[in-house]
Every structure is written in C-alpha cells, then in structure tokens.
Amino acid sequence: MEERGFWVVWSQISGIGPVLLQRIRQQFGSLAAAWRVEARELGAVEGFGRQMVEKVAIARSQLDPQKVYREHLQKNPHFWTPADADYPRLLLEIPNPPPVLYYRGQVEPLENQGIVPAVAIVGTRYPSEYGKRWTWRITKALTQRGFAIVSGMAKGIDTEAHRACLDSGGRTIAVFGTGIDVIYPRENANLYKEIQQSGLLLTEYKAGTTPDKSHFPQRNRIVAALCRATIIIEAPARSGALITARIANEYGRDVYVLPGSLDNPNAIGCLTLINKGAQLILGEDHLLEMLGEMPPLDLLATDTSQQLELFAEPKSAPSVELDPPLRQVFDALPPEDTPFDAIVAQAGMDAATVSSALLQLELLGVVVQLPGMRYRRSP
C-alpha cells in the first residue's frame, strides 16, 4: 500500500494528531515503516507514553490497513495527504498540517505549489455596513491583482469575501469545519455550489462530519497557513478572527487590519491588533503596495524571531463557566509552561480535541500559548 494510505490509517487512531504524526514520520522515515516496527520502538517518539504505545498496539492488531484505506476511498474519494504531490505546499511548512485534506471543486496546481498567492480575509459574523463595504473593496482589488481569496464560509465577513471574489471574477477557497458534504451555515448552499464550480472547498474532516464548535479553531489554522497574508476586517475583543491572526503571525505570515471606530464593539479586536503591531490598511492601493513587499515564498515560514506580540497575556483570567471538555483540559494544565503532548497525556483525551480546546481557552483569555507548542494558564 502507498504511503498516502498509511496517512489515512494512522489518522484513524484516537489520540494520534497532526503533530504526533509528523514526529512518527520523522522518527521512522515513513508512516508505512512506522506501522511495522515493534510497539516498544514507538516509545522513542516524543509524546508517546506507555498508554499511547498500548493503544497503537491494539489498533494495529485490529485494523487491516488495506481494508481501512479501501473503505475510506469509497466514502471520501477526493483527498490529499502530505505524501501527495498536490498537497498544498504552504501547509507542509506548519508544525501540524492536516494528515488528510478533503477537497471538492477545481484544483489549480500552481496554487497548491504556492506560485499563485492567496490572501485570507476573515472577521466577525455580524459586520457593520462599513465592514461589508470594505470587504468588497479590498476583495475586488486583490482579485483584480491575481490573488486567490481564502476564508471559512461562515456568515458575515467570510461570506462577504467569498461572494465579492466570485462577483469580481476571481478564485476563492472555502475551508470548512465540517465534512466536505455538510454545508454550514445552510443559507450558504448556493454559495457552496458556486465555489465548487470555479473555486475550491477544503476540510480536514471526513464526509458526514457535522458542525462542532471545537472544529472551527482548527479550521482557522488551515485558513491562515494557506495564505501569504491574513486580513482582519472587523473583530470584537474575543473573536475567532483573532485566533486566525495569532496563528498567521506564528506561521510567519503578515497580518493586516482594517481600522474601525472605537464606538463599534466589532472594531475593538482590530484596534488591539494594530496597537500590538499589525499592519494598518489605509486603502486598497496601500494594501497592494504592502503585499508587493512580502518576502519570497521560501522565507515565509523560516524565521519566527520577528513575530509580533499580537496577543499579549491578559492581566487577569476572566471568570468564566467552562463546558466539561474545556474544563477537563484547563484542569490538566498546570500554572507553569507545559508542552502540548504533556497536556494531552494529562487530560486523557485525543490530541485533536485537546488542541481545539486550547484554542477556545485562548479565545476566552484563560490560557496563553508560548513558542514551541507550549501553554500555561493566564496569570
């Protein structure tokens, strides 16, 4: 069986997330080779404790890789793995690329190679007329200059960006937090069809996966990673768009922000980003001029030493009620800096669930992420 098949098979094991899969591949040279090693050898992989080794041993005794792969192909015929030549290049530069990336629509090889540049446009689900107007102006200008537009097809700014791109004759990419066959929100059914005809639909969730709030912060990392720059149109103080901005910054991408009014609650997050060093948009021509000065593709993800402090630590953790999964992850996190894998082991949950929970806890202001996939509670 090809290496791509083992990306599928390994990803079926609960607790094996994108970061751990990368480490397994690096340790043994390929996921195919890793499937065949003695279970005890897996203990050499960082993040593999005794329980995880036992879980993999049980899974390997129960799973037939050929059968798993065949069944997956029947239900999900269109997908890429990091073993495929068409897998988006920019996703390979991040520490947690999706093991399996499902797609529908029109594939552009030059886009996947990063030769055709893409820009993310994200923001609040409840934009003002000002936010809508500038989403259209910026999207039209970028489309006419040859940029692909990436967003998450959520209501609000995401929908406006996709629609403006299509109406301007451009190409847009929608990244889902659901299965590729699940349209969310439902009112975007026509938009879904239009994007499929001329653009691309992407998700890391298999067919049939329904909306879950833990999926959307994970989705945001793909939006940020696919693009050479991320634009935040309007965002309140606690917004998923701010998570996208933080992730883009960590990946070495540029972050641009549309300024807003202090009287508009949906502008406070944007103004905060500007205060922390994000690039201020003064108009379409100004934005195009700044985008023209972006570094070459090969330099985008290689130097993180100049990252902006876009998300300074809150002065104090807010008093919030946490859902049980979030509470379980928060309780597993000690006050000191803690590696991601240690949190996974302590929480007793799979890596994808823990990663989504940590992103939500960051959004709530009770957890801070540090360089090197380390976390700690907010002071």
Image (tube, rainbow, N blue to C red):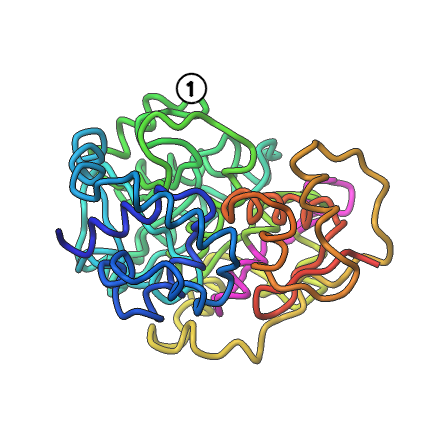
User: Magenta residues?
Assistant: 245-269
Q: Quadrant of residue 70?
A: top left
In the figure, 282 relative to 150: above or below? below
Residue 139 at x, y percent in the picture:
41, 47
Q: Is residue 291 magenta?
A: no
Label 1 crowd bin: few (<14), some (14–19), many (20+), radius 10 Å: few
In the figure, 364 relative to 251: above or below? above
Q: Is residue 258 magenta?
A: yes
- Between 167 and 331, which is closer to the camera in this rendering? 331
Residue 100 at x, y percent in the picture:
30, 47
- Tag 1: residue type? Arg
- Between 323 and 181, which is closer to the camera in this rendering? 323
In the figure, 286 relative to 351: above or below? below
**At x 32% / y 44%, what residue is drawn?**
172
Which residue is the site of mark 1?
A: 186
Residue 353 at x, y percent in the picture:
54, 42
**At x 23% / y 63%, what residue is drawn?**
33
